[in-house]
Amino acid sequence: MTAEYKVLGDVAVITMTNPPVNGLGHSTRIGITDGLAKANSDAAVKSIVLTGAGKAFSGGADIKEFGTPKALQDPNLLSVILALEASPKPIVAAIHSVCMGGGLELAMGCHYRVVSPGTSVALPEVKLGLLPGAGGTQRLPRVLGVETALNMIVSGEAVKSELLASAPGQKLFDKLAASPESVFDEAVEFAKSVAAKGGELPLVRNLPCKHPQGDAYFQFAKNMVGGMSKNYPAPLKCVDAVQAATKMKFDEGMAEERRLFTALMFTPESLSLRHLFMAERAASKIPDVADDTPQRAVKSVGVIGAGTMGGGISMNFLNAGIPVKILEMKQEALDRGVATIKKNYEAQVKKGKLKQDKYDQRMALLTTTLSYDDLKDCDLIIEAVFEELGVKEAVFKELDRVAKPGAILASNTSTLDVDKIAAFTKRPQDVVGMHFFSPANVMKLLEVVRGKATAKDVLATVMAIGKKIKKTSVVSGVCDGFIGNRMIEQYSRQAGFLLDEGATPQQVDKAVEKFGFAMGPFRMGDLAGNDIGWAIRKRRATERADMKYSRTADKLCELGRFGQKTGAGWYDYQAGKRDAIPSQVVLDLIEKHRKDEGITPRKISDEEIVQRLVYALVNEGAHILEDGIASKSGDIDMVYLTGYGFPIFRGGPMHYASQVGLYNVSESMKRFAKNPHDDASFWQPAPLIQKLVAEGKNFS
Ligand code: 3HC
Ligand code: NAI
């Protein structure tokens, strides 16, 4: 059992003890009902306090138990709450730190609630594609009013307890404790006083629940919520459930909530969001690096290169209150870089997103230099200079000369071999890749590239730093393109073949955007600059002479159509505008290319487009797992969800493939392998996929 029972005088105390956040798994539920039974059968006990040990009252239902038989085993959360309500002795919840989801539902089943200031209070189920399923949609409107409750349920956002406790007419909290340290003692005193008073015990279920505008208000709410939650069914169902609270008797409303909750539990959207929750946390764990690996202190950061990436990288650390020193070759480059940082912050101040004093604090943490010797005290130095091995060599040799022992030396290279870079130093164990994505101050993804010599404490430190600067960090081994760009190359190749075979850029983009990608491959190419891929292809021409790809992209670049920055790419652009206008020049180019290659165009369905692009990611992702470049399929999903605009509600390429069924995916791959205009060898399903299909398994 993960709940403890003890008696303090005439007060019984039930403490949930299920770290890390007292998730309400089966053993905790049993512990609570067991404690309750003991308290109610002990004549010496006059009242009961329910609380949570450690860093939460409760973070809600145990997400890890979802979909397992344990989730359904009695007592379930509903029956635990019924047992609390039915207790003849008053129960006071002593709430602190985190009170979320099922945890809040549990608290609302108690007769009274004493809360510590600073507690995060939420019904966040919607973020998992669900709605509160243990009375949250029926009880919260009764204690906070329909509108406040609906806002909390539909947004899933946490509200601080002191704000809720001071809301006029609220009945959620009976007392706001003086401090987190005193909340437990205050709850015990509160329990003693209500027991002494006697009288009928209050139940939230008996409170009225109405909205003055009735159905008209809910129609308005549905219009608003429906417009904002296109691909997600849960938010609208939240509105339905709260509406039921205002129209039905309590128990009928509960039944309606349960019906809606159960229907959401196995929607692909909920499965994807739950996968995302777990994968995001799992990404920070590296199989052979223990959680308690000692970390190196990082109190100051050096950044080399004040260009596109160096500036954005610096901002991350300034935002987190860590001093940054930027080094450049020339004063003009430094001035330009600092001006860009200033401009970015000033834009945030103008929009009201950053307070002036914060801006001043951040800029005060920034210093510049032209001399490597000034980096001698930095704990972490990140290089973001030109993408040429020779330039990196010069930089890392200088760093090896000046950096203090134990300083972490990181490269932001996107394509070069981190092991080669590490070998330019006499301390390869201190060298690591920190691959940020552009714009580096905005994009969530950080690929942490582990060289063959990278020390474990360096990895642990960089992962912790990633968390501090609010990135989703994913570890990648060393290979061309790491996880993300290695996969995108296959995706881009398919996009090219599709043009050769009969599709247009706009058809491909539309199909992929309908699937949910933020942007199709051609619009994305125009935004990022088609010349970047062109340069990479030229560099690889000798290394991978046998790699088949469509030459349309090279021909486009030969016309100088690099994308938005040149006013023309796969699409035409009007000056100062970003709208992609289909281009006759491009259509003619593609048609001529087909003729040159002797390809007769055919009609290609949107389904085929999506499958070829997404399954190309999946097959390469499987090879990446086989090669040990990524340690788990969830890591690959995180890369795509946070760095490449893969639709969140589909949970990432590997999760999506598992949802479709790996057998189906592999059959499609075999079909694509027969297409004479495609690359048959690429479409052999990766051995890992074949193995999983044979075993009837999927990636997760
Ligand atoms: N069940 C099981 N484990 C949980 C959990 C939960 N509800 N919430 C968090 N955890 C685990 C995480 O997986 C992580 O585990 P790990 O250390 O092994 O990786 C650990 O707790 C810490 O999580 P965070 O890294 O997120 O820690 P933070 O301190 O930043 O945040 C938190 C804590 C605010 C509780 C945050 O984890 C959170 O928002 N959790 C989700 C809460 C939630 O969605 N609850 C609703 C569940 S659904 C429900 O209750 C259904 C009911 O209505 C029937
Ligand atoms: P950039 O050209 O905008 O900036 C590079 C800066 O480095 C310039 O300001 C230059 O003056 C400076 N520099 C060059 N050699 C130097 C040296 N020896 N000492 C000090 N400063 C020097 O380039 P960008 O785009 O910022 O790229 C930097 C690195 O980041 C490259 O390795 C690139 O592959 C990588 N990267 C780029 C991404 C992008 O989208 N631009 C995304 C992810 C990684």
Image: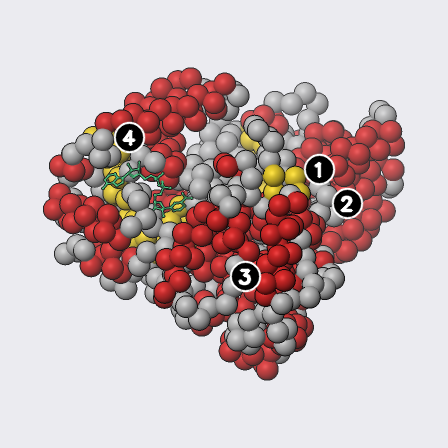
Q: Residue at x 14, y 56 (%)?
A: 426
Q: Locate ligand 2 by image quadrant.
A: top left
Which residue sits at x=58%, y=51%? Answer: 521
Name the mark on residue 228: 1
Q: Amino acid at mark 4?
A: Ala
Give the residue type at disc 2: Lys
The Cα–Cα distance between marks 1 and 4, rounded to whole angstroms, is 43 Å
Lateral position of residue 600 relative to residue 395, left or right: right
User: Would you name the residue on which mark 2 appears?
Assistant: 237
Place of residue 440 in the rendered image (x, y in percent of width and height, measured from the top left): 42, 40
Q: How far apart in space, not on screen, are marks 1 and 3 (Cα)?
A: 39 Å
Residue 409 shows in the view: no
What residue sits right under mark 3 in the picture? 550
Q: CA distance from mark 2 to mark 1?
A: 13 Å
Question: What's the residue at 21%, 39% (across, down)?
Answer: 378
For the residue marked with disc 3, what is the amino acid? Ser
**Which tag, 2 or 1, sits closer to the chain's start?**
1
Of 289 and 499, nearer the camera is 499
Circle 2/circle 1 CB separation < 8 Å: no
Q: CA distance from mark 2 to mark 4?
A: 54 Å
Q: Mark 4 CB in 8 Å range of ligand 2?
A: yes
